[in-house]
Image (cartoon, rainbow, N blue to C red):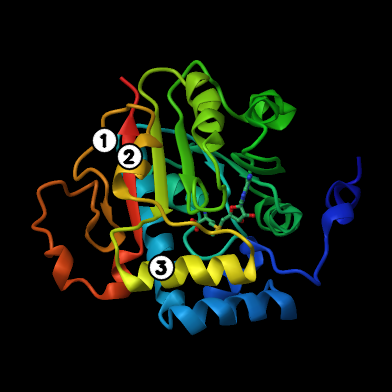
């Protein structure tokens, strides 16, 4: 199939998509009027939404760097988003130039931009696939060619897992993927959190208004997304004070963080 044919049928710029809204919030150029309207809804409820998005990207880098430092050299990044600054492959390959990265996203615009960016990078690829169909991800020929599922994998569900999916299913989708990863693998998640703060509720409201999804969840519920895996230090925490590579770092008290810094949490589970 021609590359364009692969994504053209779903390519509708009249409705916002989270990939493009997120790009707009990050200050990117790969978005359209409907997406900028979506971003405006986020900014209305959470004026620091751009900072929230950037902090999520920073957390992504922290998590990838940690996994790469632990020797992980294969990454399966689900819901990768439109390439922006400090992408997974750049962080991983800075630690280990041979690290392999597969980007998966169900928004075809990610494939369009990813293919262009990665044309010369033999260790990184991008495919259009959907977390809701995990077996299709595992059976995808490009993924099977790039990743060796007999060796540990860094499985990433960063910034999309629960909050864009409204039911109990996400855990089962991730379980299918995790079951395919051998011991020594990691599961890295960031998610919108609900600890009872109005700004967190505002983030949810913005998502529901602009995209029809984007639910917040309690820390207890987010912990369940790790499917029983023990979490590496410091456990599940607000992004701004989450430093898996520096587990002994003194943490800022949660109440001293800005309210916008208490919107997402991150954690990494280890499959022993
Ligand atoms: N992971 C990146 C990050 O944290 O910076 C991008 C996060 S962006 C907010 C969420 C991405 O997940 C979007 O690109 C969206 O298209 C993708 N996404 C949402 N639901 C998905 C699904 N069911 N399967 C695959 N990708 C999905």
Label 1 crowding class (10 Å Cα cut-off): few <14, some 14-19, many 20+? some
Distance Cα–Cα, label 3 vs label 1: 26 Å
- Residue holding disc 2: 223
Residue 18 placement (x, y as % from top left) = 62, 62
Residue 190 placement (x, y as % from top left) = 40, 50
Nearest the viewer among 90 and 228 is 228
- Residue holding disc 1: 231
Please say whether residue 205 is visible from this viewpoint.
yes
Q: Secondary structure at mark 3?
A: helix
Q: Are marks 3 and 1 in contact (CB under 8 Å)?
A: no
Q: In the picture provided, is 234 more to the left or to the right than 126?
A: left
Label 2 crowding class (10 Å Cα cut-off): few <14, some 14-19, many 20+? many
Residue 168 placement (x, y as % from top left) = 51, 36
* Disc 3 Cβ-to-ligand 1 distance below 8 Å: no
Q: Secondary structure at mark 1?
A: loop
Quadrant assignment, res 144: top right
Q: Quadrant of the N terminus?
A: top right
Dot 2 or dot 3: first in sequence order is 3
Looking at the rendered image, the disc whose residue lies closer to the viewer, 1 or 2, is 2
Q: In the picture provided, is 242 more to the left or to the right than 29?
A: left
Q: Quadrant of the C terminus?
A: top left
Q: Residue at x 49, y 56 (%)?
A: 215
Vertical comparison of 248 with 47: above or below: above
Q: Are marks 1 and 2 in contact (CB under 8 Å)?
A: yes
- Residue holding disc 3: 201
Vertical comparison of 171 with 128: above or below: above
Q: Secondary structure at mark 2?
A: helix
Dot 1 or dot 2: first in sequence order is 2
Nearest the viewer among 134 and 74 is 134
């Amino acid at each position: 199939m021609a590359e364009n044919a692969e994504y053209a049928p779903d390519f509708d710029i009249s409705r916002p998509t989270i990939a493009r809204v997120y790009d707009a919030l990050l200050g990117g150029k790969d978005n359209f009027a409907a997406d900028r309207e979506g971003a405006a809804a986020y900014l209305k409820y959470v004026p620091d939404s751009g900072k929230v998005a950037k902090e999520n990207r920073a957390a992504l880098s922290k998590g990838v760097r940690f996994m790469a430092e632990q020797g992980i050299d294969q990454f399966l990044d689900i819901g990768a988003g439109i390439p922006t600054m400090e992408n997974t492959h750049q962080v991983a390959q800075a630690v280990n130039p041979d690290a392999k990265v597969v980007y998966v996203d169900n928004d075809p615009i990610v494939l369009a931009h990813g293919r262009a960016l990665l044309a010369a990078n033999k260790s990184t690829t991008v495919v259009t696939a959907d977390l809701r169909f995990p077996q299709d991800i595992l059976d995808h020929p490009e993924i099977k060619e790039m990743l060796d599922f007999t060796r540990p994998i860094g499985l990433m569900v960063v910034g999309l897992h629960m909050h864009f999916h409204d039911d109990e299913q996400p855990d089962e989708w991730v379980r299918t993927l995790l079951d395919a990863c051998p011991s020594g693998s990691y599961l890295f998640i960031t998610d919108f959190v609900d600890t009872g703060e109005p700004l967190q509720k505002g983030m949810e409201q913005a998502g529901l208004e602009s995209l029809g999804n984007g639910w917040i969840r309690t820390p207890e519920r987010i912990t369940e997304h790790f499917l029983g895996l023990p979490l590496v230090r410091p456990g599940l925490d607000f992004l701004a004070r989450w430093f898996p590579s520096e587990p002994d770092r003194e943490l800022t008290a949660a109440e001293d963080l800005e309210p916008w810094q208490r919107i997402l949490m991150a954690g990494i589970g280890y499959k022993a």
